Image: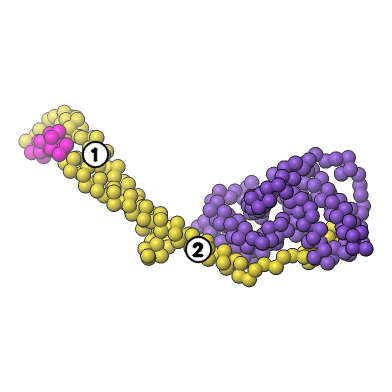
Amino acid sequence: MMELTDNELISQYLHGETKAFKYLIERYSSALYNFAVRLGASNDAADIVQDIFIKVWQNLKKFNSAKASFKTWIYTIARNTITDYLRKKKPALFSQLDSEDDTPSFEDSIEDTALLPDEVLEKAEDSAFLNSLIGGLSVNYRTVLSLYYDEEMTFDEIGKVLGKPLNTVKSQHRRALLELKKLAKSHMHQSK
Amino acid sequence: MENRLRKVFTQSTACCPENLSGNIWHVIETRKERKDRIRFWSFAAVGMVSFLFAIVTFRTMGTSFSQSGFFEYLSVAFSGGGVLASSWKELLLSLMNSLPFTSIILFLVPVFALLWSLSRAINFTKKSPLVLSA
């Protein structure tokens, strides 16, 4: 059953094959756990993943495969659940999420061939270093980077998850990398 | 750069706690059982109430039938003697007029509710037999 597509598993579950949902949990739990950790909910990531699956289970009948893929749908639920959690946890810090300007700036339109130079990438291969850098980014930037690099989603899919236009997502991705570069440089300067 | 960054991200993936998916599945199964049990007993309660209403409305319907003269018209129809052949239209009209529609509807509503709740309750016991356990 594991080789079935998400939509096939959902269809089987809705037709009474309850075990099909278990396979969906197995398929997505570790990725969602990682996503929750990336977004800054490392202490309660397991509980958050559980909440996400309960919401998915409760709303599975509402899922419409014509509108979006299951992956996009589940990550939308995940993102909202994690956002709620972070908002409850750190209301002051989280206000930055709403204040970020979504319009692409002039800086975004300039071609930059080395958003993250080799020097930074080499250092970032140390996962502790990368995680500390990501931890310094805003939740929006962390979400875009995690969905793009961890989950290998396209910008279009990320746009659907975040409910934002394609260009905004591209712009946020670019800004996130610039921010990452800035943070990496300051970290490296500090350590010298 | 993109591939390298992707590799860097993949390498720093957080370790998932052991048996996370198993625990989540267990929680969902427990919730499902509880939800099914609540729904089963709700349908059973609706069934029992409908059954009581059906008994009361059945009695009322019986009284209404006897008071409306329906049975008299019916006995005329089966009495023979050519009444049915000669004036079947009038007889049919009288039978229709004497039917206690309100009582019949009041009786049929709980009967349908009873049948519907019974079928749902039986479906639940078939789908998840655990609903009947404590």
Q: Main secondary structure of the magenta part?
A: helix
In this view, A119 is above or below A110: below
Name the one closer to the observer, A161 or B117.
A161
- Chain letter, purple: A
Chain of the residue where label 1 is placed in the rendered structure: B
Do dots 2 and 1 share one subunit? Answer: yes
Q: Colour of chain B?
A: yellow
Q: Residue B15: x, y in percent?
A: 70, 68
As for residue B65 lying within the magenta part, the answer is yes
**Residue hosting label 1:** B104
Front-most of residues A150 and B89? A150
| Residue B52 image point, x, y percent | 24, 48
For label 1, the SS is helix
Q: Which residues are magenta?
A: B63-80
Identity, as a three-letter code, of the amino acid under mark 2: Glu
- Mark nearer the N terminus (2 vs 1): 2
Residue B45 seen in the current view: yes
| Residue at point 41%, 65% (across, down) | B130
**Residue B53 falls in which quadrant of the image?**
top left
Q: Which residue is mark 2?
A: B29
